[in-house]
Amino acid sequence: MSVLDNHFYSGHGMSIGSETNGGVSSILVRDLSLDGPDNGIRIKSNATRGGLVQDVLYDNICIRNSKYPILFDTAYSFPGKGVQLLPVYDGITLRDVRISGGGKLQFNGFDHTHRIGVTLDGLLLLDKPSLYKAQAIHTDLTFGPGPVNPVFTGDDSTVTGKEVPGALPACAASFVPFPAP
């Protein structure tokens, strides 16, 4: 299993892809703080360079002030020609992920057959709901057992479970001045 264990990360997000044609599996991203990235947690590919992305766990993640705190995109920079390497994301878990500062959470599966399968086991938006847009297209979401509070909209998506109330550890200590004094 590949492991990224990073206690502070600023500027860029944590991305997998865009070339996933060889497959990506058995990834653990743990104890990561993202402060101000355009994209926080991102998996990206398209129909010309896609493959199976599976068995990925994001655990204990703090994201602050990101335009796209979560972006799973199966049509990333899709030129519109050729569909020989369709991306499929399955067996992905977001555990104890806290987001502040607003932004868009997007799960964008390719089509009805080539979907995203993701478990949200502790995903909390820490600000007013109006600061966020959560969208799931061609996605199978599973909520729980940890707390989950985003409300997703979109087409051709399923939800197993329901919004789960609760709290997660605070992120305040995860964000330190950069560069450190």
Image: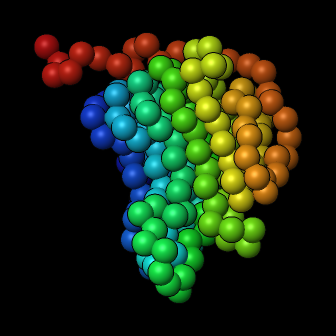
State the image coordinates of residue 43 (x, y, percent, origin top left). Answer: 48, 56
180 relative to 77 in the view: left or right: left
> Does any portion of residue 91 appear in the rendered image?
no
From this view, report whether residue 98 is shown above or below residue 53.
Answer: above
Query: Which residue shows up at 69% across the image and 30% down it?
Result: 150
**How many numbered marks have been drawn onto this rendered protein structure?**
0
| Quarter assignment of residue 18 | bottom left
Q: Residue furthest front?
A: 80
User: Where is residue 76 drawn, in percent x and y?
Assistant: 46, 61
Q: Relative to 11, is 152 on the left or the right?
A: right
Residue 1 vertical placement versus 123 (above, below)? below
Residue 146 occupies quadrant: top right
**In front: 70, or 121?**
70
Residue farthest toward the right in the current orientation of the protein:
161
Place of residue 128 in the rendered image (x, y in percent of width and height, measured from the top left): 62, 14
| Observer-nearest of 54 and 130 | 130
Residue 160 showing in the rendered view: yes
Q: Is the C terminus in the top left, top right, bottom left or bottom right quadrant?
A: top left
Q: Residue at x 52, y 41 (%)?
A: 70
